Structure formats: C-alpha cells, structure tokens
Amino acid sequence: ATDSNHFFTLCYYGRCLYQKGEYEKSIEYLTRCLNEENDYFFLWQFRGDSYWKLNDYQNALNDYLKSIELDSSNGASYDNAAMCYSLMGEHDKAHEFIDKAISFEMEEDMPMIRKAQIFEFQNLKTEALEQYKKTLSKFPDSEFANKKVLELSNNQ
C-alpha cells in the first residue's frame, strides 16, 4: 500500500516544481504519483499543465482528457483541452470543449474569453468580437474582454 503522506508530499513537490518553472522535473514527479495512484483527476490536470508549458499539446490533451474522464464536471480541464485542440487545428473539437467549460464555469470570464480566442486562432474576427462583447455583457468588469473589444472594433 502507498504511504499517503509520502504520496501527497511527492504530488505537492511536483506542483511546486511546476510553480518554479521546472516543467520536465514536475512531469517526472507527477508521473511517479500517477504510477502509484491514478484516480486523482487533479494530478492528470497538473501534469497536463506541465506538458502545456512545454508546448507538448498532444500529451497535455491526453492528460486533460483523462482528468475529464475522472471528473466530468471539471471546467478547467475542458477549457485546457479546448485550447490544446485549437492549437492543434481541431477547431470543431475546441468549440465543443470550450462550450462545455462555459456551461460549468458560471462565475469566471476565462472560458468565454477562451472561446473568443479560439475564434481569433481561426481568424474569425467578427465572431471573436461578438464573443468578447457577450463576455462583457455577463462580466462587465472583465478588463481583458474590454481591451479586446476596443482593439477588434478599431481594426474593423
């Protein structure tokens, strides 16, 4: 059996390495944790974050999808998976996943902003502008959305 104190110390250390920007080492520690115990959705998400920072979007996506499999209401992993799909050119999947994230994250503007960013990746400026406006209608204090509405409005 796994010593839970040892296990969680390893996991915490892996996350600290991530915070310090030591992504390869973070992956190494989080992988050790996942080899011992792979039922914690947040460990998959954390390791996915490290892969993301290394621009390894396929491995990041695999980990985010595993995180979603373990906790299907985890908006952050849907959001992160959407961004991976978008950067990998799979925009339909990106929209499907970001819409799911938006449905879970009612108190945060980030998933709505991400949807606009996906439109921008697709070079769909009008749709991006409309999405940023929609974000502002729900989150009037969103500085990023406000800045992007001004920027995109001036470029039309």
Image (cartoon, helix red, strand yellow):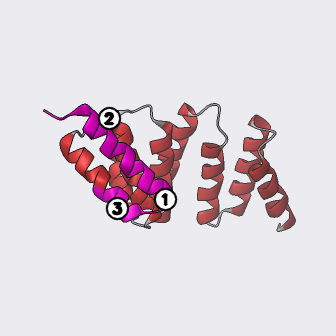
> 152 or 80: nearer the eye?
80
Does residue 129 appear left or right of residue 41 in this picture?
Answer: right
- The residue singled out by tag 1 in the image is 20
What label does residue 70 carry, if any?
2
User: Residue 11: which quarter of the image?
Assistant: top left
Q: Amino acid at mark 2?
A: Leu
Q: Is residue 76 magenta?
A: no
Task: Give the structural element (helix, strand or loop) at label 2.
Answer: helix
Does residue 119 appear left or right of residue 56 in this picture?
Answer: right
**How many residues crowd around disc 2 within 10 Å: few (fewer than 14), some, or many (20 or more)?**
some
Q: Amino acid at mark 3?
A: Lys
Task: Give the structural element (helix, strand or loop) at label 3.
Answer: helix
Circle 1/circle 3 CB separation < 8 Å: no
Q: Position of residue 27 (x, y in %)?
A: 33, 57
Q: Which segment is the magenta one?
A: 1-28
Circle 2/circle 1 CB separation < 8 Å: no
Majority secondary structure of magenta residues = helix
Can residue 66 be seen in the rendering of this structure? no
Above or below, 8 against 14 in this view is above
Task: Give the structural element (helix, strand or loop) at label 1.
Answer: loop
Dot placed on the residue nearer the N-terminal end, 1 or 3: 1
Q: Amino acid at mark 1?
A: Lys
Q: Position of residue 2 (x, y in %)?
A: 17, 35
Dot placed on the residue nearer the N-terminal end, 2 or 1: 1
Residue at (34%, 50%) from the top-left corner?
63
Does residue 60 appear left or right of residue 148 in this picture?
Answer: left
- The residue singled out by tag 3 in the image is 25
